[in-house]
Amino acid sequence: VNLERLLHTALDRDEFVLYYQPQVDLRTGHIFGAEALIRWMHPQRGLIPPDQFIPIAEETGLIVPIGIWALRTACIQAKKWNREHRHPVHVAVNLSVKQFISNDIVASVDRAIRETGLNPNLLELELTESIILENTESVIATMNQLKKLGVRISIDDFGTGYSSLAYLKDFPIDSLKIDRSFVHNLSKNDKNTAIISAVITLARKLGLKSVAEGLETPEQLHFYRMEGCDLAQGYYFSRPLPEDQMNDLLDHSV
Ligand code: G
Ligand code: G
Ligand code: MN
Ligand code: NA
Protein backbone atom coordinates (compact mmCIF):
# COMPACT_ATOMS: atom_id res chain seq x y z
CA VAL A 1 0.00 0.00 0.00
CA ASN A 2 1.22 3.46 -0.81
CA LEU A 3 0.84 5.27 2.51
CA GLU A 4 1.58 8.63 0.98
CA ARG A 5 -1.37 8.23 -1.40
CA LEU A 6 -3.61 7.05 1.43
CA LEU A 7 -2.83 10.16 3.48
CA HIS A 8 -3.26 12.37 0.44
CA THR A 9 -6.68 10.83 -0.21
CA ALA A 10 -7.60 11.27 3.45
CA LEU A 11 -6.79 14.97 3.17
CA ASP A 12 -8.78 15.31 -0.07
CA ARG A 13 -11.75 13.50 1.47
CA ASP A 14 -11.60 15.59 4.61
CA GLU A 15 -11.09 12.57 6.87
CA PHE A 16 -8.92 14.28 9.46
CA VAL A 17 -10.58 15.64 12.58
CA LEU A 18 -9.36 17.64 15.52
CA TYR A 19 -10.08 16.58 19.09
CA TYR A 20 -9.71 19.13 21.87
CA GLN A 21 -8.31 18.53 25.34
CA PRO A 22 -9.34 21.25 27.82
CA GLN A 23 -6.66 23.22 29.65
CA VAL A 24 -7.67 24.47 33.07
CA ASP A 25 -6.42 27.61 34.82
CA LEU A 26 -5.31 26.29 38.22
CA ARG A 27 -5.86 29.59 40.01
CA THR A 28 -9.41 30.26 38.86
CA GLY A 29 -10.59 26.80 37.85
CA HIS A 30 -11.83 28.28 34.57
CA ILE A 31 -11.24 26.63 31.22
CA PHE A 32 -8.28 28.48 29.72
CA GLY A 33 -8.59 26.82 26.35
CA ALA A 34 -7.79 23.54 24.64
CA GLU A 35 -5.01 21.66 22.90
CA ALA A 36 -5.99 20.53 19.41
CA LEU A 37 -5.04 16.90 18.71
CA ILE A 38 -5.43 15.43 15.25
CA ARG A 39 -7.06 12.06 14.47
CA TRP A 40 -7.78 10.28 11.21
CA MET A 41 -11.42 9.21 10.88
CA HIS A 42 -10.88 6.26 8.55
CA PRO A 43 -14.12 5.12 6.84
CA GLN A 44 -13.32 1.42 7.48
CA ARG A 45 -10.80 1.35 10.32
CA GLY A 46 -12.35 4.05 12.50
CA LEU A 47 -10.43 6.58 14.54
CA ILE A 48 -6.66 6.37 13.98
CA PRO A 49 -4.39 8.12 16.52
CA PRO A 50 -1.69 10.56 15.37
CA ASP A 51 1.31 8.40 16.29
CA GLN A 52 0.15 5.98 13.57
CA PHE A 53 0.24 8.50 10.73
CA ILE A 54 2.14 11.66 11.75
CA PRO A 55 5.56 9.95 11.33
CA ILE A 56 4.58 8.87 7.79
CA ALA A 57 3.23 12.34 7.09
CA GLU A 58 6.60 13.75 8.15
CA GLU A 59 8.60 11.34 5.98
CA THR A 60 6.51 12.09 2.91
CA GLY A 61 6.27 15.83 3.46
CA LEU A 62 2.48 15.59 3.75
CA ILE A 63 2.83 16.99 7.26
CA VAL A 64 2.92 20.41 5.58
CA PRO A 65 -0.59 20.40 4.05
CA ILE A 66 -1.97 18.37 6.97
CA GLY A 67 -0.43 20.87 9.39
CA ILE A 68 -1.91 23.80 7.47
CA TRP A 69 -5.30 22.10 7.66
CA ALA A 70 -4.95 21.56 11.44
CA LEU A 71 -3.81 25.13 12.03
CA ARG A 72 -6.66 26.58 10.04
CA THR A 73 -9.29 24.28 11.55
CA ALA A 74 -8.15 25.06 15.10
CA CYS A 75 -8.26 28.80 14.38
CA ILE A 76 -11.77 28.58 12.91
CA GLN A 77 -12.88 26.65 16.01
CA ALA A 78 -11.28 29.05 18.46
CA LYS A 79 -12.78 32.01 16.63
CA LYS A 80 -16.24 30.42 17.09
CA TRP A 81 -15.63 29.74 20.78
CA ASN A 82 -14.57 33.32 21.35
CA ARG A 83 -17.66 34.67 19.64
CA GLU A 84 -19.84 32.60 21.93
CA HIS A 85 -18.09 32.93 25.30
CA ARG A 86 -17.28 35.79 27.61
CA HIS A 87 -13.93 34.46 28.79
CA PRO A 88 -11.12 34.22 26.24
CA VAL A 89 -10.66 30.65 24.95
CA HIS A 90 -7.11 29.80 23.83
CA VAL A 91 -6.16 27.06 21.40
CA ALA A 92 -2.83 25.21 21.20
CA VAL A 93 -1.64 23.48 18.02
CA ASN A 94 1.21 20.97 17.83
CA LEU A 95 3.90 21.63 15.22
CA SER A 96 6.44 18.98 14.36
CA VAL A 97 10.02 20.08 13.76
CA LYS A 98 9.75 19.13 10.07
CA GLN A 99 6.76 21.43 9.77
CA PHE A 100 8.55 24.24 11.57
CA ILE A 101 11.64 24.16 9.34
CA SER A 102 10.45 22.70 6.04
CA ASN A 103 7.98 25.19 4.71
CA ASP A 104 6.96 28.76 5.12
CA ILE A 105 5.50 28.26 8.57
CA VAL A 106 5.34 31.99 9.23
CA ALA A 107 3.25 32.61 6.12
CA SER A 108 0.97 29.67 6.98
CA VAL A 109 0.36 30.93 10.51
CA ASP A 110 -0.13 34.48 9.25
CA ARG A 111 -2.67 33.29 6.68
CA ALA A 112 -4.55 31.13 9.22
CA ILE A 113 -4.87 34.10 11.57
CA ARG A 114 -5.87 36.61 8.92
CA GLU A 115 -8.35 34.34 7.13
CA THR A 116 -10.10 33.29 10.33
CA GLY A 117 -9.88 36.61 12.17
CA LEU A 118 -8.71 34.88 15.37
CA ASN A 119 -6.95 37.12 17.87
CA PRO A 120 -3.34 35.82 17.52
CA ASN A 121 -2.82 36.05 21.29
CA LEU A 122 -5.29 33.18 21.57
CA LEU A 123 -3.16 30.87 19.40
CA GLU A 124 -0.30 28.88 20.91
CA LEU A 125 2.16 26.81 18.87
CA GLU A 126 3.62 23.77 20.62
CA LEU A 127 7.16 22.73 19.69
CA THR A 128 9.29 19.99 21.20
CA GLU A 129 12.81 20.44 22.54
CA SER A 130 14.16 18.63 19.47
CA ILE A 131 13.85 21.99 17.69
CA ILE A 132 17.06 22.87 19.55
CA LEU A 133 19.02 20.40 17.43
CA GLU A 134 18.27 22.46 14.30
CA ASN A 135 20.09 25.55 13.12
CA THR A 136 19.74 27.83 16.14
CA GLU A 137 20.00 31.13 14.27
CA SER A 138 17.28 30.29 11.81
CA VAL A 139 15.02 28.75 14.50
CA ILE A 140 15.30 31.94 16.57
CA ALA A 141 14.62 34.07 13.50
CA THR A 142 11.50 32.06 12.66
CA MET A 143 10.30 32.17 16.26
CA ASN A 144 10.79 35.93 16.36
CA GLN A 145 8.74 36.31 13.18
CA LEU A 146 5.99 34.20 14.71
CA LYS A 147 6.11 36.30 17.88
CA LYS A 148 5.71 39.42 15.73
CA LEU A 149 2.42 37.97 14.48
CA GLY A 150 1.31 37.92 18.12
CA VAL A 151 1.10 34.16 18.67
CA ARG A 152 2.43 32.30 21.71
CA ILE A 153 5.07 29.57 21.63
CA SER A 154 5.34 26.68 24.08
CA ILE A 155 7.81 23.85 24.59
CA ASP A 156 5.93 20.54 24.68
CA ASP A 157 7.08 17.43 26.58
CA PHE A 158 9.53 19.64 28.48
CA GLY A 159 12.24 17.78 30.33
CA THR A 160 12.50 14.75 28.09
CA GLY A 161 14.74 16.02 25.29
CA TYR A 162 18.51 15.88 25.07
CA SER A 163 18.79 19.63 24.93
CA SER A 164 20.55 21.99 27.29
CA LEU A 165 18.67 24.58 29.30
CA ALA A 166 20.63 27.36 27.59
CA TYR A 167 18.04 27.68 24.84
CA LEU A 168 15.48 28.94 27.36
CA LYS A 169 17.22 32.31 27.44
CA ASP A 170 17.74 32.61 23.69
CA PHE A 171 14.40 31.41 22.37
CA PRO A 172 11.33 33.68 22.56
CA ILE A 173 9.03 31.16 24.25
CA ASP A 174 6.02 31.75 26.46
CA SER A 175 5.38 28.50 28.28
CA LEU A 176 6.76 25.13 29.33
CA LYS A 177 4.54 22.06 29.19
CA ILE A 178 5.94 19.66 31.77
CA ASP A 179 6.04 16.18 30.29
CA ARG A 180 3.48 13.79 31.68
CA SER A 181 6.11 11.14 32.43
CA PHE A 182 7.07 13.11 35.57
CA VAL A 183 3.58 12.89 37.03
CA HIS A 184 3.54 9.15 37.67
CA ASN A 185 3.96 7.70 41.19
CA LEU A 186 4.09 11.10 42.81
CA SER A 187 4.94 10.64 46.45
CA LYS A 188 6.76 12.72 48.99
CA ASN A 189 10.19 11.26 48.35
CA ASP A 190 9.90 10.71 44.70
CA LYS A 191 12.53 12.40 42.55
CA ASN A 192 9.78 13.37 40.15
CA THR A 193 8.32 15.76 42.73
CA ALA A 194 11.68 17.55 42.93
CA ILE A 195 11.91 17.81 39.16
CA ILE A 196 8.35 19.12 38.73
CA SER A 197 8.83 21.61 41.53
CA ALA A 198 12.10 22.85 40.02
CA VAL A 199 10.61 23.20 36.53
CA ILE A 200 7.66 25.23 37.84
CA THR A 201 10.08 27.53 39.70
CA LEU A 202 12.32 27.76 36.64
CA ALA A 203 9.36 28.75 34.48
CA ARG A 204 8.19 31.36 36.96
CA LYS A 205 11.64 32.92 37.30
CA LEU A 206 12.01 33.09 33.54
CA GLY A 207 8.60 34.72 33.22
CA LEU A 208 7.10 31.71 31.46
CA LYS A 209 3.79 29.98 32.12
CA SER A 210 4.00 26.41 33.41
CA VAL A 211 1.57 23.82 32.11
CA ALA A 212 1.00 20.42 33.70
CA GLU A 213 0.31 17.50 31.39
CA GLY A 214 -1.23 14.12 32.10
CA LEU A 215 -2.96 14.87 35.41
CA GLU A 216 -5.11 11.86 36.26
CA THR A 217 -5.76 12.07 40.02
CA PRO A 218 -6.85 14.70 42.57
CA GLU A 219 -3.53 14.14 44.42
CA GLN A 220 -1.56 15.05 41.32
CA LEU A 221 -3.71 18.13 40.79
CA HIS A 222 -3.24 19.16 44.41
CA PHE A 223 0.53 18.84 44.12
CA TYR A 224 0.82 20.94 40.94
CA ARG A 225 -1.51 23.57 42.35
CA MET A 226 0.50 23.83 45.58
CA GLU A 227 3.68 24.19 43.56
CA GLY A 228 2.12 27.15 41.75
CA CYS A 229 1.70 25.62 38.31
CA ASP A 230 -0.38 27.91 36.07
CA LEU A 231 -2.33 25.57 33.80
CA ALA A 232 -3.13 21.89 33.59
CA GLN A 233 -4.58 19.27 31.32
CA GLY A 234 -5.13 15.55 31.72
CA TYR A 235 -7.69 12.78 32.03
CA TYR A 236 -8.56 14.02 35.55
CA PHE A 237 -10.29 16.98 33.87
CA SER A 238 -11.07 15.47 30.51
CA ARG A 239 -9.81 13.27 27.72
CA PRO A 240 -9.40 14.92 24.34
CA LEU A 241 -12.97 15.56 23.15
CA PRO A 242 -14.64 15.73 19.75
CA GLU A 243 -15.68 19.23 18.75
CA ASP A 244 -19.33 18.96 19.86
CA GLN A 245 -18.41 17.68 23.33
CA MET A 246 -15.86 20.47 23.76
CA ASN A 247 -18.57 22.94 22.75
CA ASP A 248 -20.92 21.47 25.38
CA LEU A 249 -18.23 21.71 28.04
CA LEU A 250 -17.64 25.39 27.26
CA ASP A 251 -21.38 26.08 27.15
CA HIS A 252 -21.77 24.66 30.66
CA SER A 253 -18.75 26.36 32.19
CA VAL A 254 -18.74 29.87 33.59
O1 G B 1 -3.65 12.78 20.97
P1 G B 1 -2.47 11.89 21.24
O2 G B 1 -2.02 11.84 22.66
O3 G B 1 -2.63 10.51 20.69
O4 G B 1 -1.24 12.58 20.43
C1 G B 1 -0.05 11.89 20.27
C2 G B 1 1.00 12.80 19.67
O5 G B 1 0.59 13.31 18.39
C3 G B 1 1.32 13.99 20.56
O6 G B 1 2.71 13.98 20.78
C4 G B 1 0.94 15.17 19.74
O7 G B 1 1.89 16.21 19.92
C5 G B 1 0.94 14.67 18.30
N1 G B 1 -0.03 15.44 17.53
C6 G B 1 -1.35 15.51 17.76
N2 G B 1 -1.94 16.35 16.87
C7 G B 1 -0.96 16.82 16.06
C8 G B 1 -0.92 17.76 14.97
O8 G B 1 -1.93 18.35 14.56
N3 G B 1 0.28 17.98 14.38
C9 G B 1 1.41 17.36 14.81
N4 G B 1 2.55 17.64 14.17
N5 G B 1 1.43 16.51 15.85
C10 G B 1 0.26 16.22 16.47
O1 G C 1 2.83 15.16 23.14
P1 G C 1 1.50 15.77 23.42
O2 G C 1 1.47 16.37 24.77
O3 G C 1 1.03 16.72 22.38
O4 G C 1 0.50 14.56 23.48
C1 G C 1 -0.73 14.66 24.06
C2 G C 1 -1.15 13.22 24.25
O5 G C 1 -1.27 12.91 25.64
C3 G C 1 -2.48 12.93 23.61
O6 G C 1 -2.36 11.76 22.87
C4 G C 1 -3.41 12.70 24.78
O7 G C 1 -4.40 11.75 24.46
C5 G C 1 -2.47 12.19 25.85
N1 G C 1 -2.94 12.50 27.19
C6 G C 1 -3.58 13.62 27.56
N2 G C 1 -3.90 13.59 28.87
C7 G C 1 -3.45 12.41 29.35
C8 G C 1 -3.49 11.81 30.65
O8 G C 1 -3.99 12.35 31.62
N3 G C 1 -2.92 10.58 30.76
C9 G C 1 -2.35 9.93 29.70
N4 G C 1 -1.82 8.73 29.91
N5 G C 1 -2.29 10.49 28.46
C10 G C 1 -2.84 11.71 28.28
MN1 MN D 1 1.15 18.75 22.79
NA1 NA E 1 3.25 16.66 25.64
Image (spheres, rainbow, N blue to C red):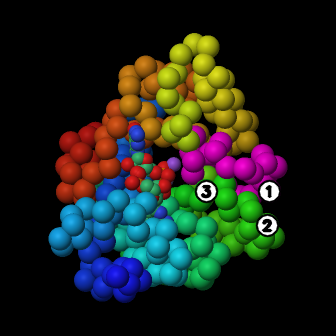
Q: Residue at x 75, y 51 (%)?
A: 163
The magenta-colored residue range is 156-178
Per the model, the C-alpha gap separating discs 1 and 2 is: 9 Å
Residue 114 image position (x, y, % from top left):
46, 78
Question: Is residue 140 visible to the viewer in this orientation of the structure?
Answer: no
Nearer the camera: disc 1 or disc 2: 2
Label 2 sits on residue: 136
Q: Residue at x 78, y 70 (%)?
A: 135
The residue type indicated by label 3 comes to Thr
What secondary structure is marked by label 3? strand
Per the model, the C-alpha gap separating discs 3 and 2 is: 14 Å
Q: Residue at x 46, y 75 (%)?
A: 57
Asked if the magenta segment contains residue 177, the reply would be: yes
What secondary structure is marked by label 2? helix
Residue 202 image position (x, y, % from top left):
71, 36
**Is label 1 in contact with label 2 (beta carbons under 8 Å)?**
yes
In which quadrant is the N terminus drawn?
bottom left
Q: Is residue 6 toward the left or the right of residue 102 in the image?
A: left
- The reply to whether the residue tagged 3 has its Cβ within 8 angstroms of ligand 2 is yes
Mark 2 is surrounded, within 10 Å at the Cα level, by few (under 14), some (14 to 19) or many (20 or more) other residues, namely: some
Marking on residue 170 = 1
Query: Which of 45/54 is in front?
Result: 45
Query: Which of 75/38 is in front?
Result: 38
Residue 111 image position (x, y, % from top left):
49, 81
Label 3 sits on residue: 128
